[in-house]
Image (spheres, rainbow, N blue to C red):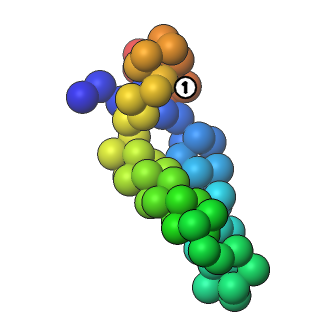
């Protein structure tokens, strides 16, 4: 897999995942919505760790800086 995510994308995704996890832990979000958001947060963390987003490939987006 070729990397297609830049550092700003990774940071934003991890920040969103942390916020969702915090809201779920504090019982601000719960139930089915909470579970769906936690799964989405897990996907955000996973894609941030491997620097690859499959949706970016489908839409032809690449935010990774060009290598010289």
Find residue 17 and report its image quarter.
bottom right
In front here: 20 or 29?
A: 29
Q: Position of residue 53 (x, y in %)?
A: 42, 34
Local secondary structure at mark 1: loop
Quadrant including the C terminus: top left
Q: Position of residue 31 (x, y in %)?
A: 60, 74
| Residue shown at the point (41%, 19%) measured from the top left | 57
Quadrant including the N terminus: top left
Q: Is residue 40 above or below residue 26?
A: above
Q: Is residue 65 above or below residue 29?
A: above
Is residue 54 visible in this depiction of the protein? yes
Q: Position of residue 47 (x, y in %)?
A: 41, 46
46 to the left or right of 14: left
Q: Position of residue 40 (x, y in %)?
A: 51, 54
Q: What residue is shown with label 1?
A: 63
Find residue 14 and report its image quarter.
bottom right
In front here: 12 or 26?
A: 26
């Amino acid at each position: 897999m070729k990397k297609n995510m830049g550092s700003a994308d990774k940071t934003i995704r991890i920040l969103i995942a942390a916020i969702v996890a915090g809201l779920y832990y504090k019982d601000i979000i719960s139930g089915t919505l909470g579970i769906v958001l936690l799964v989405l947060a897990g996907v955000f963390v996973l894609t941030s760790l491997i620097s690859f987003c499959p949706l970016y490939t489908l839409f032809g987006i690449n935010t990774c800086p060009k290598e010289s």
